[in-house]
Image (cartoon, rainbow, N blue to C red):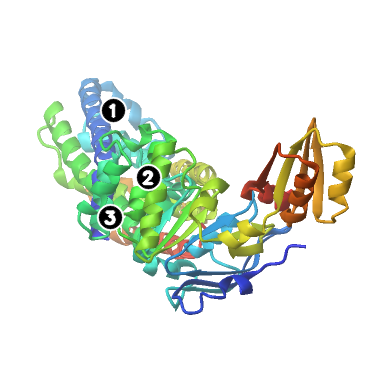
């Protein structure tokens, strides 16, 4: 099992490299953009006149154009979390259903490792991938925003919790991908899973709109990663974070369990 | 007309070690699709051909035997242990499985695939090197860029590198060139020589005829015939092929009552019989020496059973 995980991680090294490269490149562009925008004094004034609900929907706040962390929370983090969630769905579908449909699982099962071992190894590989991604993208983007912007210092704590919050969304995407992949064909699971991530993200953006049903908030994974709290206190709500992680763990466990009796 | 002969066929095996014992295995997909009450016994040191047309239930049976799909009912014993579905995984170290189209990640080279397989199975690299050389596997090209035949070679090596006691192969030689086919059949013979068991599902009946000790035929999910290859071949009708046979000689032959079927194709007359002697006697009597006599091939028998 350790070997299987080692080989799986080694095979993902290029994906990880390109993933980090993309976010590193985007960090440079956004850092330069922030410098340009922060020089325009009247932009902050524009924000003061916008309704809170709209600011919430756009994931921005006062100080958006003057404080790197606020800007990162509204721009970089939104993109990183959303694409990470969708990418997580695709990786989750690929972990089991993709291997069934490509017939690679037949080959894997012709060796002696059990279905439990294969499925758990696949989940561990994906978790380690996202952990490494969070660690490397977090450090890289923190360094880039610190280096390319003129702000005196950029909070490492902010980037740490930003990556931790994103990780919970990405792992939720992974669990949804695994679960939907067990229930449906790969193409269907990918469409439904990524659609779910996108729709719940949109709905979460509208949660502060007057008249928005209170109970609906709870069904969005993005609700459990409070970006406003991150922006204001450079922290996350631990109970929400753990709740989402437990939901993801339950979905992944259920998928692995169903897989035991799944036709390959 | 054709009844399963499993009882007959396993006579003489009673003293041999049972490797696979399948009893009343059923997987019903509805609308008469699936396999129904399949009984198969495989013994140590034999190569068994598993034949049938597409959709007959070969793959379903093999997939149940390899634990890829759960049987609906029935019993499956492997190496003397009762195992079903995912429980079979624990015996995979004793099994070698080659699917008709082996799949590995396209970016891996055969060398990496073999090394990883050897390490996962905790066997030395020497276990695959000689076989890879014999089959002329291109070790350095990524798997994704290999032809079907070369991919199959990779599958053959990974299926056999750990010297399994039971080898299950599905369409092993399709896509292989004749030389590699020959090498593959030699490898199968080596498995048999060291006491291993091979279940070979194939459409290439000439190779089934050449290397299998026993043949199991499946049709519409049911075993319709099971017999030792040599006995089966001996029981097949002989075909007399005669050119420009006159009607009076033909009538004389037909009067013997030993001809099962006759066919005229242009100037050629074909006479099918289980008993050649009376026909030969008449041909000698009328002085006909220009004829061929041949045994019905397994392929022709296959067509007769499945048409």
The lab-note entry on whether marks 3 and 1 share a chain reads yes
Q: Earlier in the sequence, mark 3 or mark 1?
A: 3
Disc 3 secondary structure class: helix
Would you call the spot at circle 1 few (<14 residues within 10 Å), some (14-19), or many (20 or more)? some
**Label 1 – label 2 distance at C-alpha:** 77 Å
* Residue plotted at (26% across, 28% down): A26
Contact between labelled residues 2 and 1, with CB atoms less than 8 Å apart = no
**Do the residues at pointers 1 and 2 share their chain?**
no
Task: Name the front one of labels 1 and 2.
Answer: 2
When the figure is inspected, residue A33 is found, relative to residue A182, above or below; the finding is above
Front residue (pair B132, B121): B132
Taking the spot 32% from the left edge, 50% from the top edge, the residue there is: A126
Query: Which residue is pictured at 56% across the width and 57% down the height?
Result: B50
Q: Nearer the viewer, residue B216 or B128?
A: B216
Q: Are marks 2 and 3 on the same chain?
A: no
Q: Nearer the viewer, residue B128 or A93?
A: B128
How far is mark 3 from mark 1, CA to CA?
A: 52 Å
The image position of residue A113, as x and y in percent, is: 34, 62
Query: Total label count?
Result: 3
Q: Position of residue A60 (x, y in %)?
A: 33, 36
The residue labelled by disc 3 is A4
Q: Is residue A102 left or right of residue A232?
A: right
Q: Chain of mark 3?
A: A
Task: Where is residue A72? Give x, y as percent.
Answer: 26, 35
Give the residue number, with chain letter if any, for mark 2: B183
The residue singled out by tag 1 in the image is A44
Provide the chain ID for the residue under circle 2.
Answer: B
Kindly report which numbered mark, 3 or 1, lies closer to the viewer in this rendering.
3
In the visual, does A103 lie left or right of B225?
left
């Amino acid at each position: 099992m350790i070997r299987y995980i080692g080989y799986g991680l080694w095979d993902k090294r290029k994906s990880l490299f390109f993933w980090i490269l993309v976010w590193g490149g985007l960090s440079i562009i956004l850092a330069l953009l922030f410098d340009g925008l922060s020089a325009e004094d009247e932009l902050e004034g524009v924000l003061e006149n916008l309704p809170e609900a709209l600011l919430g929907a756009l994931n921005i706040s006062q100080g958006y154009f003057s404080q790197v962390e606020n800007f990162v929370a509204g721009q970089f983090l939104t993109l990183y979390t959303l694409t990470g969630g969708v990418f997580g769905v695709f990786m989750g579908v690929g972990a089991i259903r993709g291997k069934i449909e490509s017939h690679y699982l037949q080959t894997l099962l012709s060796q002696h490792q059990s279905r439990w071992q294969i499925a758990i190894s696949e989940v561990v590989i994906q978790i380690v991938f996202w952990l490494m991604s969070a660690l490397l993208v977090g450090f890289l983007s923190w360094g880039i925003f610190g280096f390319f912007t003129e702000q005196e210092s950029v909070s490492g704590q902010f980037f740490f919790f930003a990556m931790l919050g994103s990780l919970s969304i990405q792992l939720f995407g992974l669990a949804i991908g695994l679960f939907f992949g067990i229930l449906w064909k790969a193409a269907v699971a990918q469409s439904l899973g990524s659609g779910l991530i996108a729709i719940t993200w949109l709905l979460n953006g509208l949660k502060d709109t007057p008249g928005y049903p209170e109970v609906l908030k709870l069904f969005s994974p993005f609700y459990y990663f409070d970006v406003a709290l991150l922006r204001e206190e450079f922290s996350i709500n631990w109970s929400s974070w753990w709740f989402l992680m437990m939901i993801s763990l339950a979905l992944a466990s259920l998928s692995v369990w169903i897989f035991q009796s799944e036709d390959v | 007309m054709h009844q399963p002969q499993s009882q007959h066929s396993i006579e003489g095996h009673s003293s041999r070690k049972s490797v696979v014992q399948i009893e009343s295995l059923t997987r019903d997909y509805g609308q008469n699709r699936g396999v129904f009450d399949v009984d198969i016994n495989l013994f140590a040191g034999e190569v068994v051909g598993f034949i049938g047309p597409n959709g007959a239930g070969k793959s379903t049976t093999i997939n149940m035997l390899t634990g890829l799909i759960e049987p609906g009912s029935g019993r499956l014993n492997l190496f003397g242990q009762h195992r079903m579905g995912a429980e079979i995984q624990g015996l995979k170290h004793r099994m070698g499985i080659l699917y008709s189209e082996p799949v590995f990640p396209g970016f891996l080279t055969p060398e990496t695939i073999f090394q990883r397989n050897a390490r996962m199975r905790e066997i030395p690299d020497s276990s695959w090197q000689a076989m890879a050389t014999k089959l002329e596997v291109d070790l350095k090209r990524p798997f994704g860029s290999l032809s079907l035949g070369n991919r199959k070679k990779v599958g053959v090596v990974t299926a056999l590198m750990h010297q399994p006691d039971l080898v299950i192969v599905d369409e092993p030689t399709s896509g292989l060139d004749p030389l590699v086919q020959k090498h593959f059949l030699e490898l199968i013979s080596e498995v048999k020589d060291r006491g291993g068991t091979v279940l070979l599902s194939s459409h290439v009946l000439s190779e089934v005829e050449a290397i299998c000790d026993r043949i199991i035929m499946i049709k519409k999910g049911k075993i319709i015939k099971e017999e030792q290859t040599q006995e089966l071949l001996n029981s097949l009708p002989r075909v007399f092929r005669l050119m420009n046979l006159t009607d009076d000689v033909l009538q004389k032959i037909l009067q013997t009552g030993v001809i099962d079927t006759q066919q005229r194709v242009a100037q050629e007359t074909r006479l099918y019989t289980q008993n050649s002697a009376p026909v030969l006697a008449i041909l000698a009597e009328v002085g006909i020496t220009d004829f061929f006599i041949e045994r019905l091939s397994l392929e022709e028998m296959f067509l007769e059973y499945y048409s």
